[in-house]
Amino acid sequence: MRKASITRTTKETEISVSINLDGTGIYDNATGIGFFDHMLDQLSRHALIDMTVRAKGDLHIDDHHTVEDTGIALGQSLARALGDKRGIRRYGACQLAMDDAQVGCALDLSGRPYLICNLSMPSAKIGSFDTELVREFFQALSTHGGITLHIDQRHGFNSHHIAEAAFKAVARALREAVEPDPRMGDALPSTKGAL
């Protein structure tokens, strides 16, 4: 089974993440940030990755450290669960519509982190959640998961819909990329001999 657990403790946060890449999208996420939990639930459900996240952070300051450190721990968990990446599809893409919003994601589990995040949310907050933290989460996920991650918004005027479409598009692309490729067998999806 392709599973991993990571615990990350700093002076700002205590994060634990457990994932199963071969799950069915069962989730149990509690970060103390309601909207962020909702986004993590979407990520789990639509990627079909079982996910449990527990986070305690310095929310009396703001949500930044908790969101970023959760992205770090989740990225590290993905990298560990994927191992040497033999037999996976490696690439994934999704163009996802949610009401007024349309967001596309293309990603490569290349081991080379790179983020392009073209999201333009008209409001600074969704409830009490700072919309700029969406990018911060994806930056941490990309960097620590070794993911080349491109997220591009084509349409949208509702910030909640734009953010949720982004998380769902990433989830669907990730689902495709981590899946075993029956034609690949146990081969590495690279001509370099390493990912």
Image (cartoon, rainbow, N blue to C red):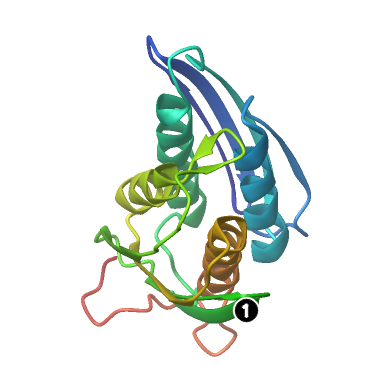
Q: Quadrant of the C terminus?
A: bottom left
Residue 109 appears at what percent x and percent y? 38, 66
Please tell me whether residue 30 is drawn above or below residue 93 in the rendered image.
above
Residue for point 40% across, 49% down: 141
Q: Nearer the viewer, residue 36 or 50?
A: 36
Which residue occupies the extreme left position in the image? 192
Residue 1 appearing in the image: no
Quadrant of residue 191 within the rendered picture: bottom left
Residue 53 appears at what percent x and percent y? 63, 33
State how many labels appear.
1
Q: Which of 108 and 60 is in front in this view?
A: 60
Label 1 Cα crowd, 10 Å radius (few <14 / some 14-19 / many 20+): many
Residue 116 appears at what percent x and percent y? 29, 65
Q: Nearer the viewer, residue 5 or 51?
A: 51
Please tell me whether residue 104 is drawn above or below residue 143 in the rendered image.
below
Residue 81 appearing in the image: yes
Residue for point 49% across, 75% down: 87
> In the image, is 171 to the left or to the right of 137?
right
Residue underneath mark 1:
97
